[in-house]
Image (cartoon, grey):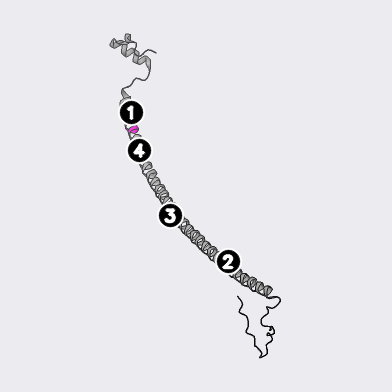
């Protein structure tokens, strides 16, 4: 509400003349409306700036948490790759160890096979020596064997016939 301006009263009995302070300016409503609009506009721009700041902060926080999650995933993947690499190295070492053991086993088996062959060769030699020693008592042909068997009375058995 507007407070009316105080008028100066003259000593005469006439009514005081209206002053220019009493009358509202002709565009007072427009001025008031413009002030209101400017105030609302400044509030809206301040709210929009606050909202934009909050959105930017939330986005930055989301990006930071996404970056942390990505870093965490990368670290886990790195550790998993290190374990895998260590396992591959261990497997290669075991494979190399098995190859060395297999070569040693092959060498040992070759020695055993050579010893077996040497024993078999020696057994064949001994057998041949015994046969050569007994060969002087053998018959040289089938006719001589038949004659001796007939003389002994064993020719009828048919053991020596073909």
Under tag 3, what secondary structure?
A: helix
**Disc 2/disc 4 C-alpha distance (Å):** 97 Å
Give residue 161's mark. none
Q: Nearer the viewer, residue 100 or 71?
A: 71
**Disc 1/disc 2 C-alpha distance (Å):** 116 Å
Q: Which residue is mark 1?
A: 132
Q: Is residue 125 highlighted in magenta? A: yes
**Disc 3/disc 4 C-alpha distance (Å):** 52 Å
140 over 27 or under it: above or below: above
Q: Is residue 80 highlighted in magenta? A: no
Q: Contact, CB < 8 Å: mark 1 with mark 2?
A: no
Under tag 4, what secondary structure?
A: helix
Q: Which residue is mark 2?
A: 52
**Of the two numbered discs 3 and 2 in the rendering, the one whose residue sits closer to the viewer:** 2
Horizontal and vertical percent position of residue 56: 56, 65
Density class for disc 3 (Cα within 10 Å; few <14, some 14-19, many ≥20) is few
* First in residue order: circle 1 vs circle 2: 2
Image quarter in which the C terminus is found? top left
* First in residue order: circle 4 vs circle 1: 4
Give residue 118's mark. 4
**Of the two numbered discs 4 and 1 in the rendering, the one whose residue sits closer to the viewer:** 4
Taking the view exactly as shown, the residue that stands out farthest to the right is: 26
81 over 145 or under it: above or below: below
Horizontal and vertical percent position of residue 52: 58, 66
Q: Which residue is mark 3?
A: 83
Q: Could you say which quadrant of the image residue 26 lies in? A: bottom right
């Amino acid at each position: 509400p507007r407070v009316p301006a105080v008028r100066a009263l003259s000593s005469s009995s006439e009514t005081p003349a209206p002053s220019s302070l009493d009358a509202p300016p002709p565009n007072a409503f427009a001025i008031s409306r413009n002030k209101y609009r400017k105030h609302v506009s400044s509030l809206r721009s301040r709210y929009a700036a606050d909202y934009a700041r909050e959105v930017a902060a939330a986005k930055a926080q989301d990006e930071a948490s996404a970056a942390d999650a990505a870093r965490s995933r990368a670290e886990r993947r790195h550790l998993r790759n290190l374990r895998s690499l260590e396992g591959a190295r261990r497997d290669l070492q075991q494979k190399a160890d098995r190859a060395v053991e297999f070569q040693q086993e092959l060498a040992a088996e070759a020695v055993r096979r050579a010893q077996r062959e040497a024993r078999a060769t020696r057994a064949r030699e001994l057998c041949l020596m015994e046969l050569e020693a007994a060969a002087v008592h053998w018959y040289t042909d089938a006719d001589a064997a038949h004659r001796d068997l007939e003389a002994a009375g064993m020719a009828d058995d048919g053991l020596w016939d073909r």
